[in-house]
Amino acid sequence: MAGKAEVRSSIVSSQYVHAQYGGVVPELAARAHMRLIVPVTRAALDSAQLGWQDISLIAVTYTPGLMGALLVGLPFAKALAFGLGIPFVGVNHLEGHLFALRLEYPDLEPPFLAAILSGGHTELIVVEDWCRYQHLGSTLDDAIGEAFDKVAKLLGLPYPGGAVVESLAHSGTASLGFPVPDPGGLDFSFSGLKTAVLYYLRDNPDAVGADVAASFQSAAVSAVTNRVVQAGKQTGLETVGVSGGVAANGYLRERLADIALQQGFRLLIPRPEYCTDNAAMIAAAGIERFERFGPSSFDLVAAARTPLG
Ligand code: KG4
Ligand code: ZN
């Protein structure tokens, strides 16, 4: 049943407040959450033409993430559930990214291989069953989205940098030969690539920004395609799902599609608005967790880091 979940509304409030600082300022993020959580919830109900009394279950991210943001969202969800006399379910944000795949592909059945590529995580996972995961690899330093954001900053572009680096790369060529990161096994590493960009810009004051963007993007995406192919061979899984904010990148989507065709695996990537953070994916994960494990306890506490379990 959860597989057929229908999205009645999806409201995302992006925080442009961070752009002027070149990165997320935790205190400002927490304050923005506090200010926006009620209006955003109201807007979601209005656009679905539903009232508070129509809600039967609340799903909420309780980990991982910025503590200040979690400390607004989780108590808000608990209070709402308590006030309405309905259950709530705490969801791991990474599990939400996995369920974005099922939102887009309702018939998707585990097992499959999944890559989560976001601003805070770069993870390769086997989804053995919904809610049962095996960790294959992750980044040893920066997340891939973080690398896009840092390279954007080096190029004097605004935060968040992923989409702007992608659009600048359109007018450049990947001619600079930055090294494709390979820390071994099925792990990732992006800080060396970022440093290569830093040194290149330092040593070449007349560098063409578009070529730097294209060369960085090409190396970062190669790191992903290499790992996906390797993990596919290692596990024998023939379906690969990719999600998280960086999976909105058109160049990455094309490269993965080419490789899927070449290697003969089935590639699933949600539409861009389900790749980047959204509440619909948290709801989808919450429905499944509720059906399998029942409601969360009101004792549930927010945690900055919790592995996907
Ligand atoms: O999943 P997400 O929305 O939030 C986290 O859970 O972190 O991912 C945000 C990250 C940011 O680093 C952002 O720069 C990156 O995804 N991103 C992109 C693109 N759109 C968003 N990176 C590359 N190309 C894009 N088009
Ligand atoms: Zn995310």
Image (cartoon, rainbow, N blue to C red):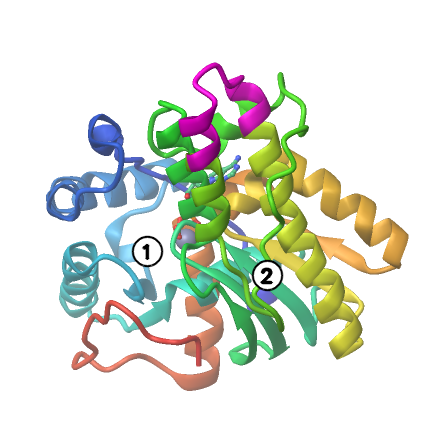
Q: Is residue 155 visible?
A: yes
Q: Label 1 vs label 2: CA separation? A: 35 Å
From the viewer's perspective, tell me whether residue 117 is left or right of residue 113: left
- Number of marks in the rendered image: 2
From the viewer's perspective, tell me whether residue 218 is left or right of residue 47: right
Q: Amino acid at mark 1?
A: Asp
Q: In the drawing, what numbered circle is on residue 204? A: none
Q: Residue furthest front?
A: 203
Q: Residue at x 63, y 46 (%)?
A: 221
Do the CB atoms of the residues marked 1 and 2 lie less than 8 Å apart? no
Closer-to-camera residue (298/142): 142
> From the viewer's perspective, is residue 58 above or below residue 199?
below
Q: Quadrant of residue 300?
A: bottom left
| Magenta span includes 207 | yes
From the image, which quarter does the N terminus lie in? bottom right
Q: Residue at x 33, y 42 (%)?
A: 44
For the stretch drawn in magenta, what is the main secondary structure? Answer: helix
Nearer the viewer's eye, disc 1 or disc 2? 2
> From the viewer's perspective, is residue 5 above or below residue 29?
below
Q: Which residues are magenta?
A: 199-212
Residue 29 percent coordinates (x, y): 18, 44
Residue 204 percent coordinates (x, y): 47, 22
Q: Residue at x 47, y 56 (%)?
A: 281
SS category of the residue bearing label 2: strand
Residue 127 percent coordinates (x, y): 61, 75
Q: Amino acid at mark 2?
A: Ala
- Going from N to C along the chain, the mark reached first, 1 or 2, is 1
Q: Quadrant of residue 36?
A: top left
Q: Quadrant of residue 61?
A: bottom left
What residue does disc 2 label? 115
Closer-to-camera residue (230/34): 230
Q: In the drawing, what numbered circle is on residue 54? A: 1
